[in-house]
Image: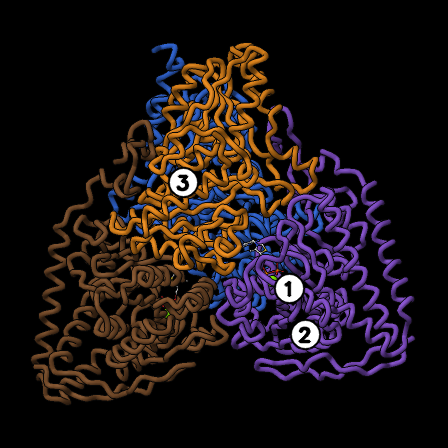
Chain colours: A purple, B orange, C brown, D blue
């Protein structure tokens, strides 16, 4: 059902040295249902990852995205797979948004062959180059210049596409971001810097890490927009606006006001540096999925039961993917030595006991 | 009595801060969060926000600030959440810290400690698992320490903080929670270990095994296994990668005539290569078998558990290499 | 003669999120004569360094400061030796301003024992810790966080002094500067960032390297002042203002509009990326020494001949220092191994042939 | 015919840009200024500002941008004015470039070249003289090349640009102006040298000398002197530090039974240490004398001319070490 429905974004946009997009957006029952379904799937996937971690099937770092779903979904709704996305370690949902599968996600998280990086990357290093997803980066801030480099390549190749480089409020203070922004502005690169401001960098509240936590203004001479990142329509509208802007005028910053429900990673209970009231307040008043649920009801698009059924379906999809992923074998030991290089020139590479384990690189 | 490495580090910081008002801590999450790995737990409460400083995630900036404060005469202890992130600040560690005393002919010394977990942890993938021991210890002007036990951690961290030169202090996340027996002496607030001296953890006569950090534990376990097969290994805990205690290593090899080096880092230009070269230079004639290097695999760290296990030395790798070295007493060519 | 004379700075100050200092400054015949003498000495010293380089007595990189003298002199006039200064590689005159001697300068430049770094540092690495000069740094941008660290230590030690960290227009784009500024602002450090905008970073004009070459505004949330860096009184006034500001409120940026007459370093003729007219225009209209000469005449403080005599005297001082420096011996070979550490623990260090040359470190 | 190293590099860049529109150059002063050392002279004029990009002095930013462009499939050649400044960007070289192909299981390869002068120049002091060969070549995922002659420079740079993996290309400022004889083949635009292969610059039977970059010239001159004293040295120009051509080195040592390594960088964990370890591992029984390492002094680079000379290997250091190795044929201990 594609009947147009006109709605307003939750809040007006606030801008820095640029126009503001309109608050009025058009949607349809179909789009509303899609947003609900996609976000519910992400939510469920992350909850499941949490359990898998607790049962020790996922190891190391694991950063969950629940609460921030509207950013990934709204952004995808505004762009195509020819546009590029690059993000940090909190990358499961971004990958899913780009068309990655649950099976790839869970296989990667459990270090199996079926993972999107064949089990070699892990939670922080998801990629899907064929639909413009360039990772999954573990070093805070690094993905921003990398994303500007993708934008450079798009412009160099005259592709008329743009790159969205996502980073956190903590990352927003990184010097390399300012370096890359200056170069992007000098060269008019179609780079959109998306600050996912979830208000904490690990245990540090934004104002403790930034003298000026108005991240949409931090580009100084680069335009910026502040966006309600819990409202998928605001995100979509802002990303559309930004893409047009970037193709014409070069870089722009989007600050997405969002929230992560989980702790920073699995070792962080997420409750020492913020109150439980704060978290439940956001859940009650700003949750991106609940917002869509309400809109669906308001426009009589589906019943409570129908939405619950969808959520059950999502849960089932997730459970099935996990079951399948568990069947995916561990990588073959020979994979230890593959992909070090594209071209290995037949030289030798070594294992810990080099007299016992060595391989000739292809 | 027992003490965890975490407590050893925490108490060393605490005591040195209490002894010298010029000592202060800075880094990400060292204060209110009590440290990403809780090494700085309780110190903000005790010493206040003027001496325990939470920084933004901007390693180049805060490291430069730390080094500048050391120029002035303060004694900063800079925590890297892990040493992987020290690469963002490495120019300050090398060019601003290590070289200043030399370039200024002694005017600007730099009493600073850079500390944090180094090398492989568990399941954290390629960007979070690198060992920086060989890199930093290549650079004159730096001192590079790598504790294994709680005694090491406590004694070496105190030494590092008191030292007038820049010290890179490489911890290991997987050791933080481990308990070690410690003597009463170690509990004393004056306790301190000498920089530049290795420790013979286990005496032996048949083969020398050098290791540092977590690998010391593996070497000791390998030595137990070897003992059962009649091979009596001497295990050297390097403690200091720079200065490297070449004297202790060579003395040992002159006794055992065989050498294995163990490390988790990449093999090429590693600590093992240096030790091998140092022994060939000083004690070539004493070597009865080729030196065996056991090191991290020559690949970025994979995530999958089975591959990760293959990528770092295991006890059996050390045992196997040791046996190879011991069963071969005549140079290869002669027997070929 | 300390009779007060009231003058106006050449231009009004322009400010960014702060008040402006008054254009009216008080001086005296004595101060005017001192400024003339000090700047003339610097000018002569740099010209002499140029000749020494050309006769191969100075090696490697050598960055000259002629044209920018008013910055070093005006800054010193506003502060004390308890305040700290840190700068980049263009450091000869800053060192002299802090009370370093010509003999130390020329000895260092020629790599002699008498140098301020005993010949071990070279042109880029001058220091004078006893009067608050912390170098002399070769890596573009690095001195800015280092300077903020000095300011941190001053505040930590409750010394009520400030640090001036000098950097170029090229360095102004470095990410570490933005990182250090954010931290300095969060911690209210008494750090004064002085951008010596000589309009070129090597061969790159400011606007080719910076999207926004308004360097006094680049601190965004940090106040800034734009200052005529060719007017020693404007510099002095701004530095006084900045010191007061920094002690009370934390960091501030001073952009000094200045000019380097020489090329970037000795290998750069300095004439491929700018016109000779531009250079001679600045010399004729904005030269910091000529400005003082005119003021001295306008206030009948000295005659043309008297000033010429001073310049001759300066030339003689410089020539004598060079002659003396030439007598200073090369460092003793044993110095190769000194100062690697303060405390060497008696370990060995090695020369290229380690079997032949090794030393026990003290 | 003769060609300078500068022309060799310049022509290689020119030809590869003309052959492949995906190749572009970026760095400080590479365009309008024609390169700080004039390696990119004329290329802005020829290829325009879209393919020859002057950057601000922000190494972290522009290196990250270069790596990102390579992710997309372009072939950036990133110039560091000198490799000393690569430390500001080293996180991108290691974590963003070297590890991506592995972490993505082959999805994201990174066809990029990082080039510029490396190591000691003349009179530029401690912060501008560091050799990064051992550091970079420690890291799996990178390839590290170090040309000596014009043939090397041309053939290896072309190979680096065509290679699908990240290559660190270490030049030497003091060689730029040097002329070398080159064959007609080298002038051909298809000319290319294999990555990972060393070159035997001079055959000999008495001792093997390994070297790279400027030190190859010194080794050759030392070999001339040694020849007059009846010592016939084999000189190996490593060309590739990673992959290291262990086969060529070991084959040579099995013939000569003696080895000297020469490099300008710091000794600890250096290229010499690795070569020594590799030879001990593979050819221990063939060694008739301890391996001799000749390397930069273990100190930051001093400025004064006399100290600087003492801080880097001289021809006489190589000659002296070679003689020591040759006059001693029996292991030390045996004679002790
Ligand atoms: C350079 C660097 N420093 C430190 C870390 C450790 N670390 C990982 S995530 C993180 C917090 C980042 O916060 P933010 O940018 O707000 O992103 P969020 O996690 O909230 O999505 C830190 C400190 C790192 N990965 N890289
Ligand atoms: C990180 C780094 N990159 C490059 C260089 C080489 N370099 C030295 S000075 C310079 C230009 C700096 O210009 P600016 O900051 O304007 O200072 P100025 O020389 O004009 O005083 C460059 C590119 C360096 N020393 N450090
Ligand atoms: Mg955050
Ligand atoms: Mg400039």
Secondary structure, mark 2, is strand
Chain for disc number 2: A
Which part of the image, by quadrant, shows the N terminus of chain A?
bottom right
Front of the two marks 1 and 2 = 2
How far across and how far down the image is residue C57, in percent? 22, 54
Disc ID at residue A166: 1
Q: Which x, y percent locates residue B177?
A: 55, 38
Residue B158 as seen in the image, left or right of residue C1: right
Position of C62 compared to B130: left or right? left
Q: Secondary structure at mark 1?
A: strand
**What kind of element bears circle 3?**
helix
Q: Nearer the viewer, residue B329 or C84?
A: C84
Disc 3: CA contacts within 10 A as few (<14), some (14-19) or many (>=20): many
Q: Residue at x 69, y 63 (%)?
A: A85
Q: Nearer the viewer, residue B117 or D146?
A: B117
- Which residue is the site of mark 2? A228
**Quarter for ligand 2?**
bottom left
Q: Residue at x 69, y 76 (%)?
A: A238
- Residue C91 sits above or below residue C286 on the image: above
Asked if the residue at label 3 sits under 8 Å from ligand 1, the reply is: no
Distance CA(mark 3)–CA(mark 2): 47 Å
To the question of a shared chain for discs 3 and 2, the answer is: no
Which residue does the image show at 57% across and 45% down from the upper left?
A: D142
> Is residue D114 toward the left or the right of residue D302 in the image?
right
Q: CA distance from mark 1 to mark 2?
A: 15 Å
Q: Are marks 3 and 2 in contact (CB under 8 Å)?
A: no
Q: Residue C266's mark?
A: none
Q: Which of the 4 image quarters holds residue A23?
A: bottom right
Asked if residue D34 is positioned above or below residue D239 in the image, the reply reads below
Query: Which residue corresponds to mark 3?
Result: B157
- Compared to residue D82, the image places residue A184 above or below, namely below
């Amino acid at each position: 059902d594609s009947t147009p429905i006109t709605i307003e974004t939750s809040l007006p946009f606030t801008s820095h040295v640029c126009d503001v997009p309109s608050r009025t957006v058009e949607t349809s029952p179909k789009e509303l249902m899609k947003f609900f379904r996609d976000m519910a799937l992400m939510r469920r996937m992350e909850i499941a990852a949490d359990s898998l971690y607790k049962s020790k099937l996922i190891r190391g770092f694991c950063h969950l995205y629940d609460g921030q779903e509207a950013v990934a979904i709204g952004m995808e709704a505004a762009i195509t797979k020819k546009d590029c996305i690059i993000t940090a370690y909190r990358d499961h949902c971004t990958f899913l948004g780009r068309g990655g599968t649950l099976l790839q996600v869970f296989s990667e998280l459990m270090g199996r062959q079926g993972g999107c990086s064949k089990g070699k990357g892990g939670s922080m290093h998801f990629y899907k180059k064929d639909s413009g997803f360039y990772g999954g980066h573990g070093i805070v801030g690094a993905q921003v210049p990398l994303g500007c480099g993708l934008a450079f390549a798009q412009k160099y190749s005259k592709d008329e596409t743009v790159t969205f480089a996502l980073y956190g409020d903590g990352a927003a203070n990184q010097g390399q971001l300012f370096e890359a922004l200056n170069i992007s502005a000098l060269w008019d690169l179609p780079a959109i810097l998306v600050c996912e401001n979830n208000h904490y960098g690990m245990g540090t509240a934004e104002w403790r890490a930034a003298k000026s936590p108005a991240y949409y203004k931090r580009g100084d001479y680069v335009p910026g927009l502040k966006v309600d990142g819990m409202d998928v329509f605001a995100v979509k509208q802002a990303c559309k606006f930004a893409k047009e802007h970037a193709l014409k005028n070069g870089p722009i910053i989007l600050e997405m006001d969002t929230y992560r429900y989980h702790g920073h990673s699995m070792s962080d209970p997420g409750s020492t540096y913020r109150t439980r009231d704060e978290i439940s307040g956001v859940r009650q008043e700003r949750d991106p999925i609940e917002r869509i649920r309400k809109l669906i009801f308001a426009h009589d698009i589906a019943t409570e039961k129908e939405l619950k059924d969808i959520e059950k379906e999502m849960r089932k999809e997730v459970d099935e993917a996990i079951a399948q992923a568990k069947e995916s074998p561990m990588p073959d030991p020979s994979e230890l030595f593959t992909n070090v290089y594209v071209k290995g020139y037949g030289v030798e590479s070594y294992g810990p006991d080099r007299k016992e384990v060595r391989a000739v690189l292809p | 009595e027992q003490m965890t490495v975490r407590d050893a580090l925490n108490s060393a910081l605490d005591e040195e801060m209490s002894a010298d008002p010029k000592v202060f801590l800075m880094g990400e999450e060292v204060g209110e969060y009590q440290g990403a790995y809780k090494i700085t737990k309780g110190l903000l409460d005790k010493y206040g926000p003027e001496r325990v400083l939470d920084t933004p995630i901007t390693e180049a900036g805060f490291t430069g600030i730390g080094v500048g404060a050391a120029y002035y005469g303060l004694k900063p202890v800079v925590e890297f959440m892990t040493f992987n992130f020290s690469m963002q600040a490495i120019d300050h560690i090398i060019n601003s810290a290590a070289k200043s005393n030399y370039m200024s002919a002694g005017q600007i010394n730099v009493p600073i400690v850079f500390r944090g977990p180094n090398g492989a942890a568990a399941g954290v993938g390629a960007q979070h698992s690198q060992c920086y021991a060989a890199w930093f210890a290549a650079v004159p002007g730096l001192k590079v320490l790598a504790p294994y036990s709680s005694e090491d951690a406590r004694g070496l961290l105190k030494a590092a903080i008191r030292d007038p030169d820049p010290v890179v202090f490489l911890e290991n996340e997987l050791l933080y929670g481990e308990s070690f027996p410690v003597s009463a002496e170690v509990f004393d607030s004056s306790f301190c270990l000498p920089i530049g001296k290795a420790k013979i953890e286990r005496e032996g006569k048949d083969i020398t095994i050098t290791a540092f950090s977590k690998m010391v534990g593996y070497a000791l376990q390998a030595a137990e296994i070897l003992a059962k097969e009649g091979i009596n290994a001497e295990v050297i805990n390097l403690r200091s990668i720079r200065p490297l205690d070449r004297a202790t290593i060579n003395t040992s090899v002159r006794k055992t005539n065989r050498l294995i080096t163990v490390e988790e880092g990449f093999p090429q230009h590693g600590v093992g290569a240096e030790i091998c070269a140092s022994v060939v230079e000083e004690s070539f004639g004493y070597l009865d078998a080729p030196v065996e290097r056991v090191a991290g695999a020559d690949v970025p760290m994979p995530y999958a558990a089975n591959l990760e296990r293959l990528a770092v030395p295991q006890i059996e790798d050390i045992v196997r290499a040791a046996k190879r070295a011991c069963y071969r007493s005549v140079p290869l060519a002669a027997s070929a």
